[in-house]
Image: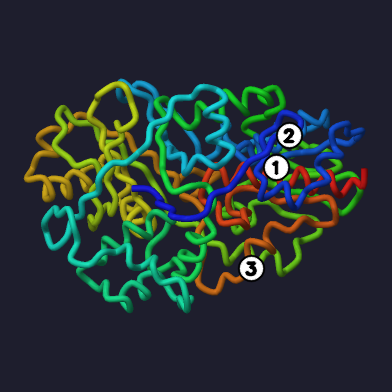
């Protein structure tokens, strides 16, 4: 299952050969003046996820010196690729392209990357049975556009008539936003659906989403990426900024773009000198990011549905072979929020796998265990430099994303999916947009 949007569409323009979202460029028209940038300063980018990679890509196109430092041993952030598990490559992280009116879709088209519309059918686990249609259509939750209260999505669903019987159906919908229904704001979830502008269809890659980012963006800046470099301090008190890593190595720059996950900022893994303004740290605290994992289950026969929503252990199962040429039988358990926390607490990949097989056996009359071949658990919760799925909007969040994303002293800039203020957080394209936005903000601050 993935987000379904029924909203207006965006347009994209090309400036200097670079594809730019018009929604951003309208606020950054000065970009057209930056074709011949003369700047001898250096930019340090913290994090080599989609936002950091694209920020570097734009800086390179402008001839500006930069370096990307990444705490992990690989680049890509919450993108990843697994070979060898099946006879097709597996997306360990982001895997759906949401709509065709965005930069990622344009890059896919430009590079002849094969994508397939994911129009797979959904079934529901409801009252102990697999059903095609629910007694009450949960789509009704998104039809109410006025006076939606800023309460949890769980409470809102209950108020709208989707009570205990629909508990795990509602969790499946909430899981699309990366958290439990009790943590997500109903007001913001519906507001963000209304703000979505990339198109209402989802697509899957014949290869992987990681391949698109790798070949079209990362390959252009790979010589500028320094891996296994966890930044622990940023001193922006002087004109020359100094970043220090966990091994006490230092890196100097004139500007720094911070693109780490919101979990890292909330945990104060990076100490800022001087300390960040209180309003900014409070904004960080209001942006949620909870546990999330993807478990790939390989079977010797296909006994399962294309999508099944409503499990108490995993609220969303999906056929992972859709969009692929090969035909290995791989079922994805897309686990978010409290369900991901519970599975993590089991302590091992074997225990996680067994819990899922037990639930699938209940749903499919024992076929899961009888057909099981192997599993692969990608637990983003336990990744030391990520620690969760993706950001979501909490109750009482207000303008937290806007405040969190605001630059400081024309020195520090903040990007990443959690810093997207146009409704595209939680997505690769949303992260890309912020990388572009902050480079343009940086260039504007140069007063060229």
* Residue toward you, 430 or 256: 430
Residue located 70% across and 32% down the image: 18
* Residue toward you, 182 or 354: 182
| Image location (x, y in percent) of residue 37 | 88, 34
| Vertical placement of residue 137 versus 118, above or below | below
**What kind of element bears circle 1?**
helix
Disc number for residue 58: 2
| Image location (x, y in percent) of residue 407 | 77, 55
Disc number for residue 436: 1
Q: CA distance from mark 1 to mark 3?
A: 21 Å
| Vertical placement of residue 426 versus 73, above or below | below
Residue located 50% across and 59% down the image: 392
Quadrant assignment, res 435: top right
From the viewer's perspective, is 62 left or right of 55?
right
* Residue toward you, 347 or 293: 293
Quadrant assignment, res 93: top left
| Image location (x, y in percent) of residue 402 | 67, 62
Disc number for residue 399: 3
The numbered mark, 3 or 2, whose residue comes first in the sequence reads 2
- Mark 1 neighbour density, 10 Å: few (under 14) some (14–19) many (20 or more): many
Q: CA distance from mark 1 to mark 2?
A: 7 Å
The numbered mark, 1 or 2, whose residue comes first in the sequence reads 2
């Amino acid at each position: 299952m993935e987000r379904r949007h029924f909203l207006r569409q965006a347009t994209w323009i090309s400036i200097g050969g670079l594809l730019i979202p018009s929604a951003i460029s309208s606020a950054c028209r000065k970009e057209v003046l930056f074709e011949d940038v003369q700047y001898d300063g250096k930019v340090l980018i913290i994090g080599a996820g989609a936002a950091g990679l694209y920020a570097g890509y734009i800086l390179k196109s402008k001839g500006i010196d930069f370096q990307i430092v990444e705490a992990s041993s690989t680049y890509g952030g919450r993108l990843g690729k697994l070979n060898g598990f099946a006879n097709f490559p597996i997306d360990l992280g982001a895997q759906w392209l949401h709509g065709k009116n965005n930069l990622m879709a344009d890059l896919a088209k430009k590079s002849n990357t094969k994508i397939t519309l994911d129009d797979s059918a959904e079934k529901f686990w409801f009252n102990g049975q697999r059903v095609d249609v629910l007694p009450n259509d949960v789509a009704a939750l998104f039809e109410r556009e006025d006076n939606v209260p800023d309460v949890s999505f769980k409470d809102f669903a209950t108020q709208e008539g989707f009570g205990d019987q629909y508990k795990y159906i509602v969790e499946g919908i909430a899981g699309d936003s990366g958290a439990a229904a009790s943590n997500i704001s109903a007001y913001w979830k519906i507001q963000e659906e209304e703000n979505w502008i990339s198109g209402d269809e989802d697509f899957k890659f014949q290869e992987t989403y990681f391949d698109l980012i790798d070949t079209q963006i990362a390959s252009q800046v790979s010589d500028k990426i320094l891996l296994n470099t966890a930044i622990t301090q940023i001193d922006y008190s002087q004109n020359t900024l100094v970043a220090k890593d966990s091994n006490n190595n230092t890196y100097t720059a004139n500007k720094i773009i911070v693109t780490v996950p919101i979990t890292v900022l909330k945990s104060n893994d990076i100490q800022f000198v001087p300390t960040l303004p209180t309003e900014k740290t409070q904004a960080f605290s209001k942006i949620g990011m909870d546990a999330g994992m993807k478990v790939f289950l390989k079977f010797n026969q296909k006994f399962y549905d294309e999508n099944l929503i409503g499990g108490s252990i995993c609220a969303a199962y999906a056929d992972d072979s859709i969009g692929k040429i090969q035909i290995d039988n791989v079922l994805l358990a897309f686990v978010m929020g409290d369900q991901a926390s519970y599975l993590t607490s089991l302590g091992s990949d074997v225990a996680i796998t067994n819990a899922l097989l037990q639930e699938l056996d209940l749903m499919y009359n024992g076929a899961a265990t009888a057909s099981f071949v192997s599993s692969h658990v990608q637990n983003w919760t336990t990744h030391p430099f990520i620690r969760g799925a993706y950001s979501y909007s909490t109750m009482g969040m207000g303008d937290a994303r806007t405040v969190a994303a605001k630059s400081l002293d024309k020195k520090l800039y903040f990007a990443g999916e959690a810093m997207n203020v146009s409704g595209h957080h939680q997505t690769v394209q949303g992260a890309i947009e912020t990388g572009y936005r902050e480079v343009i903000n940086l260039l504007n601050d140069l007063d060229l």
